[in-house]
Image (tube, rainbow, N blue to C red):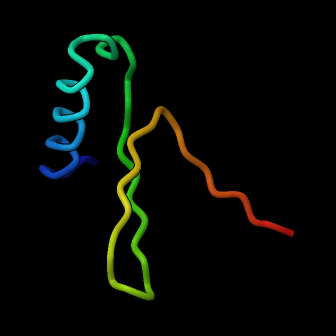
Amino acid sequence: MQDNSDTIYLANFYSKWKGAMNEVKLNTYKIALNSTGGEITIIAKSFRIEKHR
């Protein structure tokens, strides 16, 4: 479920593209950083993390 900040991120992204991306359904993904307490927000169709061997 998206919170208010997700909605704002997506609305801002779509407005910057001025209609060119309106047909693309995007999602937001958040990654919490333990070392700094920060957060990364990714706007994408899909997202996955792959472990390095």
Q: Where is residue 42 in the image (x, y as percent from the top left)?
A: 41, 49
* Residue at the far bottom in the pictured view: 35
Q: In which quadrant will I find the C terminus?
A: bottom right
Quadrant housing residue 28? top left
Q: Which residue is drawn at 38% across and 31% down?
A: 26
In this rendering, the answer to whether 7 lies above or below 49 is: above
Quadrant housing residue 43? top left
Q: How many labels does the image show?
A: 0
* Residue at the far right in the pictured view: 53
User: Horizontally, is 38 left or right of 16 in the view?
Assistant: right
Q: Where is residue 12 in the image (x, y as percent from the top left)?
A: 17, 35
Q: Where is residue 35 in the image (x, y as percent from the top left)?
A: 44, 88
In this rendering, the answer to whether 47 lies above or below 11 is: below
Front-lying residue, 35 or 47: 35
User: Horizontally, is 52 left or right of 41 in the view?
Assistant: right
Q: Residue at x 32, y 76 (%)?
A: 38
In this rendering, the answer to whether 13 lies above or below 1 is: above
Q: Which residue is drawn at 43% across and 85% down?
A: 34
Q: Where is residue 40 in the image (x, y as percent from the top left)?
A: 38, 62
Q: Which residue is drawn at 61% across and 50% down?
A: 48
In this rendering, the answer to whether 17 lies above or below 8 is: above
